[in-house]
Image (cartoon, rainbow, N blue to C red):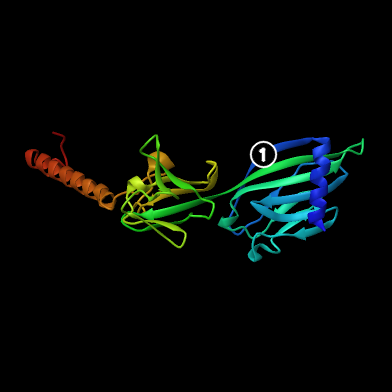
Amino acid sequence: MFKHLNLLLLLLLYIFNYSETTTRSVKGKKGGNVTLSCDFKAKDIYYIHLSRRKSILSCQNEECESESESESQNGRVFKEGSCDVIIKDLRLSDAGKYILRIYYTSYQTELKRQIRTYRLHFQDFISVKKGEELKMDVLLMNAYKVVHWSRRSTGRKEDWNRGHGVRSDRMTIRDGNLTISNFTSTDAGTYEVLDSEGEILIMVTVTESKDKMNYINYDTQQHTPPIPSEAYWIVPVELSVFLLILVALKRKRMHRCPGAQMHIC
């Protein structure tokens, strides 16, 4: 039913020739939910349609029809309110561009359209010890290249390209993972997974993991460093030496002045 409605809407929009488009970036978290907000206050919304390469969801008034790209996506995408769309249980494969078309009638009963474009991307953080293996689950179906921004360089370096593969002998590809063997400090930095339009799908920040220090750097953390164990016996020893010197001086004085207990020298 909705497919015939789509054809009718396209015909009407061709006649009225009116549409408005906005684009926004949306950050998601693996396993979480994300809302594609339409921010549209028109009361007379007639039809909405969400697509991503293929149709995902179509809603006419309160009646919605799921047209998921794959069976695994069933039940994860639904409409909320007048035209907001929620995606539940996010997966990295959900990253990419979504287009929401909103059809509504104006006060003059003319059919109009607004288009919302969403760029859904993910951000991740990984800490790796030197010499270990760095594995990043980033090679999505719509990934075109992976670039690396090193903290020691101002420019970016392309590590992987769908047409040419990896750029280093230490890199391998397996099951959608980009793996770097024998991790070094130069491998730290930010890795961006880009689509064919140069838009970010996934951003991974990689840091070098180091063993904990014996004490906190008090210059930066404003903490007092621990007192060495030797400091606990330095004061008693110095006091003992001082007392011995006083006793020796007193004996020497009494030796020079016999009867010092009764007379003053």
Residue at 35 percent across and 51 percent down: it is: 213
SS class, disc 1 = strand
Is residue 49 visible in the rendered structure shown here? yes
* Image spot of residue 245 (x, y percent): 15, 43
**The residue positioned farthest toward the right in the image shown:** 108
Q: Is residue 245 left or right of residue 93?
A: left
Relative to the observer, which residue lies in front, 229 or 52? 52
Q: Is residue 55 left or right of residue 90?
A: right
Relative to the observer, which residue lies in front, 80 or 199? 199
* Image spot of residue 66 (x, y percent): 74, 60
Is residue 37 visible in the rendered structure shown here? no
Q: Quadrant of the C terminus?
A: top left
- Which residue is the site of mark 1? 23
Q: Is residue 90 above or below residue 97?
A: below
Residue at 16 percent across and 35 percent down: it is: 264
* Circle 1: residue type: Thr
Label 1 Cα crowd, 10 Å radius (few <14 / some 14-19 / many 20+) = few
For the image, the number of numbered tags is 1
In the figure, residue 174 lies in which quadrant?
A: bottom left
* Image spot of residue 137 (x, y percent): 48, 57
Relative to the observer, which residue lies in front, 153 or 10? 10
Relative to the observer, which residue lies in front, 175 or 55? 55
Q: Is residue 260 left or right of residue 121?
A: left
* Image spot of residue 95 (x, y percent): 58, 51
**The residue positioned farthest toward the left in the image shown:** 256
Q: Quadrant of the N terminus?
A: bottom right
